[in-house]
């Protein structure tokens, strides 16, 4: 494809006014608002890492952000930090950068402790951008720029020179062993202070509402890319007085790739504001400033915890240890309490908040004689621990310390794990509730999910119904090479080759004129608009924070990146289709509007497949195996004779075949999307085999194949309707018109 930018005429992004939680709850009166309010930061963090296991995360995310923005706006002295002039925005951000810099360091934490506490931020870096390239936004220039930033942070390979990979290497070099970010152990890890979750939690909340809060997300990203991070600045200052720093930390702190993200964010901001009417631009600048202030706020919380709170704790600890030293002298005793090979005094000097939480845990433990097993959880350390139990004098010291600390309201408290499981989306629901949804309505609501979260139940049932149909025919479907086999690597490869060869065998030399008329092709192009305007949407949530570290996600993210243009709006598949619609004179309402979904020119079943794509994407964990199979079927469908013949037909009628040629070029079996889709299946099943054994691997293979066959089952009604409507429109009606003209 040419690098020349095409005029895709993307729709104007209209952002909503910042409405209040009270208004939101009036729109959604069935939400358990009290339960949402009572979720702790750690509870909400864990749920947002697994959004398809809880039905209320979108509401909870909105309520939290609304509260944070109100606090900023109501703060005395708060004012818009930006002038509203795009040409001086970069200069204003550089001034904010200088204002935010910390030049002196309060010695209340060690570098190692700061590295640990920064881990939740670093390991979820960029998470607020994970949904900006969803189906409703991916075709815009703004989303294209923001996706480039997200891809630069994430990387497509586990060993890339990207921030996430670099910080994992930093943790390894500092001998810090942490659970995976998607686990419950990470969310409730006692070695983190609560303030360490403020920034990643805020990022995850923004990721739930990319359309509603897009101006704020742009401001948040500007603050990130222009280095307004105070907590990261603390780490930089600590490195200046530290010797023998690992190269991984230097590479992370001074990664040259980070500098380029500033230009991308400015481009995204410029692209967004160009699409706004003049009357909304003042509000846009206000909200952009709110996003910048939000980033500074959540970053400062950790800084405050690591400085002011730590100083208070150290003061109390100093008083207690001084008293104990005097007592030891009188009793001719000694104190030598060690944690991870260090005296406890060192821990209170270097990581006071964590040490306090450890003390509280020991005092609440059923058997404090065996506290060593808990140390690795607190201090994330792989060092050899000194195996010994606490003496009575040491327990007395801890009790005295705890009494002294009760007066400090600012000390961090470990939030206990949830007593009840997350509220799962129901597997069954009243049929009457589902009946109000047809494919047209679901299409509209899924593209506007932030305003219609109630449609998720229907979306889940929509996917489940078609997956069940696929499973029921997988052993008897025709042709036979499409049937379920027992999985083996050799057998799978043979089946893929059989599918490919069967398609190739249908290749015939083009003979003019095509069987279908130009008018028939134009009508067909219109009918396929609902699905091709959301091309790639089945993978839109595959790289969310809860699963983007898995090897499978990297294969599928590479495919999704190509589907949405890999940071280039003119390469976005949906935009290529828009160009086709424009060149053929087909005019349709904007695809995210209700006018589009209710457009009378569409066959009703034209929405079945795109709704399946949009719906299955909302449950990337629940339907992971099925999505892998669906993706395999989609990528294999781009091979062979069908697309080649279509290119010839379109060329004959002087219709641009770019959208078809595009898939032919990237869906090849050797190195293209089909190869990536094949490898994703193999790697996924190998992981299941290693973890759960052969029988479980075969069960997941059945799920994959049900997803594969869904590409035939879901659009079956549309194919029949397409043929019938073609017959009525281009055969029956033309014959009737001929008879009328003869008369």
Image: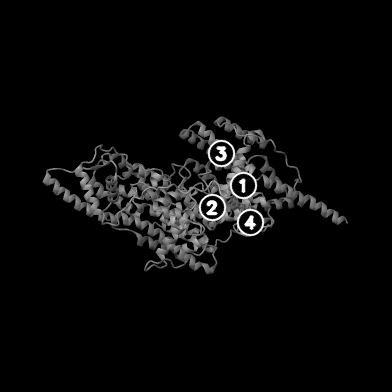
Q: Which numbered disc flags the more N-terminal residue, 1 or 3?
A: 1
What residue lies at 73% left-to-right and 42% top-to-bottom?
Answer: 510
Question: Foreground residue, 733 or 673?
Answer: 733
Label 2: how many residues lie within 10 Å, few (<14), some (14-19) or many (20+)?
A: many
Label 4: how many residues lie within 10 Å, few (<14), some (14-19) or many (20+)?
A: many
Instruction: Provide the residue designation for mark 4.
Output: 597
As measured in the structure, the alpha-carbon distance from the residue carrying label 4 to the one carrying label 2 is 18 Å
**Secondary structure category for the residue under label 3:** helix
452 over 498 or under it: above or below: below
Q: Residue 542: x, y in percent? A: 51, 46
As measured in the structure, the alpha-carbon distance from the residue carrying label 2 to the one carrying label 1 is 21 Å
The quarter of the rendered structure image containing the C terminus is bottom right
Instruction: Provide the residue designation for mark 2.
Output: 134
Q: In which quarter of the image is residue 4?
A: bottom right
Residue 647 appears in view = no
Question: Foreground residue, 185 or 739?
Answer: 185
Q: Residue 539: x, y in percent? A: 54, 47
| Mark identifier at residue 662 | 1
Q: Residue 523: x, y in percent? A: 71, 52
Foreground: disc 1 or disc 4: 4
Foreground: disc 4 or disc 2: 4
**Secondary structure category for the residue under label 2:** loop
Q: Which numbered disc flags the more N-terminal residue, 3 or 4?
A: 4
**Secondary structure category for the residue under label 1:** helix
Instruction: Provide the residue designation for mark 3.
Output: 704
Foreground: disc 2 or disc 3: 3
As measured in the structure, the alpha-carbon distance from the residue carrying label 2 to the one carrying label 3 is 24 Å
Q: Is residue 141 left or right of residue 249?
A: right
Q: How is the image coloured?
A: one colour
């Amino acid at each position: 494809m040419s690098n020349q930018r095409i005029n895709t005429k993307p729709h104007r992004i209209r952002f909503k006014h910042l409405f209040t939680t009270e208004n939101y709850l009036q729109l959604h009166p069935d939400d358990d608002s009290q339960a949402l309010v009572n979720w702790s930061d750690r509870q909400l963090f864990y749920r947002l890492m697994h959004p398809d296991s809880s039905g209320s995360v979108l509401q909870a995310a909105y309520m939290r952000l609304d509260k944070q923005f109100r606090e900023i706006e109501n703060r005395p002295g708060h004012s818009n930090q930006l002038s509203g002039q795009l040409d001086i925005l970069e200069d204003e951000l550089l001034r904010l950068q200088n204002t935010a810099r910390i030049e002196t360091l309060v010695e209340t934490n060690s570098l190692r402790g700061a590295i640990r506490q920064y881990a939740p931020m670093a390991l979820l870096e960029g998470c607020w951008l994970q949904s900006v390239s969803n189906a409703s936004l991916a075709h815009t220039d703004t989303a294209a720029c923001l996706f480039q930033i997200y891809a630069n942070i994430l990387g497509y390979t586990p060993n890339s020179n990207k921030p996430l990979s670099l910080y994992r290497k930093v943790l390894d070099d500092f001998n810090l062993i942490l659970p995976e970010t998607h686990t419950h152990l990470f969310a409730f890890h006692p070695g983190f202070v609560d303030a360490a979750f403020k920034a990643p939690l805020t990022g995850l909340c923004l990721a739930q509402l990319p359309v509603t809060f897009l101006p704020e997300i742009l401001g948040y990203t500007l603050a990130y890319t222009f280095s307004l991070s105070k907590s990261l600045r603390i780490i930089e200052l600590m490195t200046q007085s530290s010797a023998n720093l690992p190269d991984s930390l230097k590479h992370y702190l001074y990664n040259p790739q980070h500098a380029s993200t500033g230009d991308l964010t400015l481009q995204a901001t410029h692209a967004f504001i160009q699409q706004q009417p003049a009357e909304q631009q003042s509000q846009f600048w206000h909200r952009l400033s709110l996003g910048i202030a939000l980033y500074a706020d959540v970053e400062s919380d950790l800084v405050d915890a690591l400085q002011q709170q730590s100083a208070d704790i150290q003061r109390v600890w100093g008083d207690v240890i001084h008293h104990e030293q005097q007592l030891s002298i009188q009793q001719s005793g000694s104190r030598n309490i060690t944690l991870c090979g260090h005296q406890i005094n060192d821990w209170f000097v270097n990581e006071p908040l964590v040490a306090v939480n450890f003390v509280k845990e020991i005092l609440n433990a059923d058997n404090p004689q065996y506290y060593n097993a808990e140390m690795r959880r607190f201090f994330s350390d792989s060092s050899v621990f000194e195996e010994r139990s606490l003496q009575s004098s040491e327990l007395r010291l801890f009790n005295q310390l705890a009494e002294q600390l009760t007066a400090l309201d600012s000390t961090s408290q470990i939030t206990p794990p949830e007593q009840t499981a997350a509220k799962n989306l129901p597997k069954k629901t009243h049929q009457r509730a589902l009946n109000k949804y047809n494919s047209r309505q679901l299409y509209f609501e899924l593209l506007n999910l932030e305003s219609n979260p109630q449609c998720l139940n229907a979306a889940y049932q929509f996917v489940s119904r078609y997956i069940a149909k696929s499973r029921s025919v997988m052993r008897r479907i025709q042709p036979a090479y499409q049937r379920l086999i027992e999985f083996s690597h050799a057998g799978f490869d043979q089946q893929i080759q059989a599918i490919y060869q069967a398609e190739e065998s249908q290749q015939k030399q083009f003979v003019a004129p095509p069987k279908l008329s130009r008018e028939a092709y134009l009508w067909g192009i219109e009918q396929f608009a609902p699905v091709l305007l959301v091309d790639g949407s089945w993978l839109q949530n595959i790289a969310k924070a809860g699963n983007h570290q898995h090897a499978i996600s990297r294969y599928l993210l590479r495919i999704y990146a190509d589907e949405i243009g890999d940071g280039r709006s003119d390469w976005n598949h949906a935009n290529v289709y828009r160009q086709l619609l424009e060149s053929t004179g087909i005019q349709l309402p904007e695809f995210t509007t209700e006018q589009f979904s209710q457009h009378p020119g569409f066959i009703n079943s034209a929405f079945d497949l795109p709704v399946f794509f949009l719906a299955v994407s909302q449950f990337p964990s629940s339907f992971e195996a099925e999505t892998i199979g669906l993706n395999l079927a989609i990528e294999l469908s781009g091979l062979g004779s069908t697309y080649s013949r279509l290119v010839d037909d379109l060329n004959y009628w002087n219709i641009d075949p770019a959208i078809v040629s595009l898939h032919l070029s990237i869906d090849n079996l050797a190195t293209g999307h089909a190869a990536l889709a094949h490898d994703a299946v193999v790697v996924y099943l190998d992981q299941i085999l290693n973890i759960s054994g052969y029988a479980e691997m075969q069960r997941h293979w059945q799920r994959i194949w049900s997803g594969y066959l869904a590409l035939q089952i879901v659009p079956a009604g549309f194919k029949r309707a397409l043929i019938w409507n073609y017959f009525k429109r281009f055969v029956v009606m033309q014959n009737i018109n001929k008879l009328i003209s003869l008369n």
